[in-house]
Amino acid sequence: MTTILLSRTDSIGDVVLTLPLAGWLKERLPGCRIVFLCAAYTQAIVESSAHVDEVVNWNTLEKLPEHEQVRYFQALAIDTIIHIFPRPAIARLAQKAGIPKRIGTRNRLYHWLTCNHLVPLSRKNSPLHEAELNLGLVRPITDSSSPLLRDIPRYYGLTQLPDLPERLGDVLDSARFNLIIHPKSQGSAPEWQEERYRQLCRLLPAERFNIIVTGTKAEGEKIRHLRQEIVKFGGQDLTGATTLAELLALVANADGLLASSTGPLHIASALGKNTLGLFAPIRPMHPARWKPIGTKATVLSLEKNCRACTGGKPCVCIDALTPEAVAAVIQSWLEPQ
């Protein structure tokens, strides 16, 4: 049995867009075993994919002495490691563990010293989507062309979902459309301003929409007025109230999700939910690179190439997206599909 280790130890959205690589490898290399090396806080997502056979928590592993790390890797009997999110420490560990095939990109100097299969791939200036770039890394072990972007959703494999806790099930309303709004992105991308979300909520009839606002506790403090308004009109405030596993289960049981470019947006699209992403047309954060990929996913973004809204400045491009335009997309989800 061939064992392949996928190394991606960064953020939620990045990990979600890496899961199709596991599904693709399972299809192209029947019988292969997929091990996924991830950060602790994304582990719940990786464990939900039927295409991943074993999950390794990097935050736990990196605390061990080096000789124990090497022994751990050797015990996994890995044939190939793919450095999707490059980290020098992991590249050196894979080399010391004697993994036969070590795949990395050419544009990392330490990969020239630690990898024996180098792929000419640069993410920064590429016109490809992040999921397509991930798939490009398997060229040294498959002789097949990558799937088209529209076909990628069938490779997520998110079928082993955690159960929804009763306390979260109680916030869902079977008589209304359960819409999750996740306004913040922990600074990963430009965000719609709070007032825009408040205007949107006034446009969505409370008798038809059960609005649920999510985010971390710190993010909740930044959108206090929005949270208050949502609760006032019969919605739910869950900021700071869910673990990632619980959020995953909540999204799986909701009807739709609205967010900027952030992890929960990709979770919702991977689960086949009605998903709307609000994007700024700024490279490399633009939708061509980071849009959600799903059967019911769409984006709103200005048709321009902007370089002005950088360095933490308020993004006029994303704020140019009107609440009326966003409401029109969301209300279309009520129509029979």
Image (cartoon, rainbow, N blue to C red):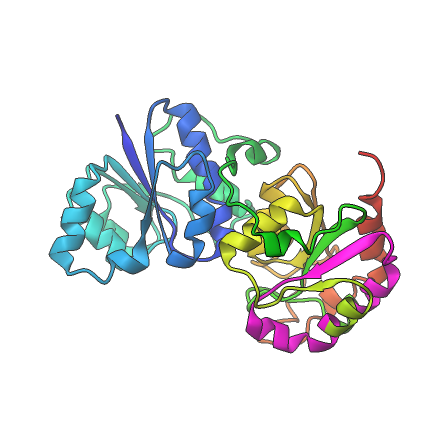
Relative side of 245 to 5, left or right = right
Q: Quadrant of residue 241?
A: bottom right
Q: x, y (%) of residue 141?
A: 33, 30
Q: Is residue 77 above or below residue 246?
A: above
Q: Which residues are magenta?
A: 198-227
Looking at the image, the residue that sits furthest to the left is 67
Instruction: Please name whichever residue, 275 or 121, is drawn nearer the observer in this view of the structure.
Output: 275
Image quadrant containing the C terminus = top right
Q: Residue at x 71, y 63 (%)?
A: 236
Residue 93 part of the magenta-drawn span: no
Which residue is pictured at 77% across the width and 67% down the height?
230
How far across and down, in percent of the image, does residue 270 sit? 58, 42
Give coordinates of residue 147: x percent, y percent.
52, 30
Q: Is residue 312 visible?
A: yes
Quarter occupied by the N terminus: top left
How far from the left and from the top, in percent, is residue 213?
68, 63
322 relative to 50 in the view: left or right:
right
Q: Nearer the viewer, residue 243 or 68?
A: 243
